Image (cartoon, rainbow, N blue to C red):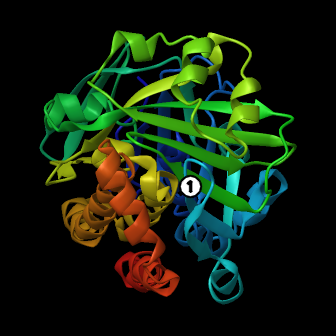
Amino acid sequence: MLSTPIQESHAPIDILIVGGGIAGLMLSIMLERKGYNITLVEQATEWKPIGGGITLTLNGVKILQDIGLLDVILPYANEIRHINITDQQGKKLSSFNLDGYAVSYAKTFTVLRHDLHSALIRRLANTRVCLGTSCTAIINEGNKVKVSFTNKQSGIYDLVVGCDGINSFVRRTLFSNNVNKYCGYASWRFIAVGVEVQQNTLTEMWGVGKRFGIVPLRDNKVHCFASVTALQNSAANRNISVGDFKGLFSGFAGYVPDLINALKKNSDLMYNDLEDVCLKKYYKGRVVLIGDAAHGMTPNMTQGASMAIEDAIVLAENLTDRSAIEKSLEHFQAARWHRTRSVQKKSNLLGKIGQLDNSYLCRLRNYSWQRIPDRWIQNDLRNLLVNNRTRLD
């Protein structure tokens, strides 16, 4: 057995966390602090340096700061002070200055996903981690959940938390298999090394049906994000060569040519069809979803990591004792659904604007966007990311 049920009502809650990404690791750390018995299963057989860079926006950083985890991440982090949107030639359409938030609230950082994972893993103390292990069955049985695993073992838990990403097995098993919505564009990510860019500025460049994102990291590395309006699961896009990728984005100026030229082989390009996960309820019985498993969203607002961090903190804060788990999950749902849905909608809208593929509409978009006062954008993001902080309480 991976876990033994505890009978005493005063004993720590026995919890299974499925998935060792940001959401799963953050939740494990927070639940350890409450003295619960935690088992974390992760399908990967080892912690590998996979994935690209991520942006930890000020709302996520504020939480890390408040709970004492920011210091373990700072050695790997690069501070972002400005976010710019430009046309594909580099002409600025809008600019978002983060300096004021850095002083009064929290900073914004970029970090390699693997470095963030490694920093969080090192903070685990009592969690039982089972690598190379996946779930094969999850059954709600009243006030317990029975889970079977790929290693032929099984366990009984007071609570199961699905942190297993946008294609969550937990969600498909107990909730719904038809909640992933394709957003109309495909994306590639890659890490460029040795190209000098503005170190404190995150830039997104808008073309016609195409975008290119430039996210500086530490150690002379740059996370690059490129997207193109396309049919879902296009074989040509999934198997694109470096040469064809260069041709696809040859009309972009600024740092883009040098960044693309840093690509060495086809496998350096990480491909995804971008989707939203639209789920009305994040829990069923004593199984709950958090992070991308619950509300996967496009990266346009760079909120994936911060929403996962918020989820983990809110769920951990709401869990009290075994007899009140259902009530805790109700409180979690009430605290998180409207916030995550509003962020998801704004991210989706921003993506649609950036991905316009009609040249006339793109000229109109660029003309109009240049004339939106930057303070309007500042106020909108402040309302979304800072003023809604009360939803975490």
Residue 298 on image: x %, y %: 38, 47
**Measured along the vertical axis of the image, is residue 284 above or below residue 93?**
above
* Residue drawn at the location 61% of the way across and 65% of the way down: 83
Residue 289 visible (yes or no)? no
Residue 128 visible (yes or no)? yes
Residue 300 on image: x %, y %: 44, 53
Left or right for 275, reference 216: left
The image quadrant that residue 194 belongs to is top right
**Measured along the vertical axis of the image, is residue 301 above or below residue 260?**
below
Furthest toward the bottom, the residue is 104
Residue 55 on image: x %, y %: 60, 54
Residue at mark 1: 32
Q: Nearer the viewer, residue 265 or 359?
A: 359
Mark 1: give few (<14), some (14-19) or many (20+) Cα within 10 Å.
Answer: some
Quadrant for the C terminus in the image: bottom left
Residue 235 on image: x %, y %: 36, 10
**Element at badge 1?**
helix
The image quadrant that residue 260 belongs to is top right
Say what amino acid the circle numbered 1 marks: Glu
Q: Nearer the viewer, residue 351 or 23?
A: 351
* Residue drawn at the location 79% of the way across and 56% of the way down: 198
Quadrant for the N terminus in the image: top left
* Residue drawn at the location 50% of the way across and 86% of the way down: 375
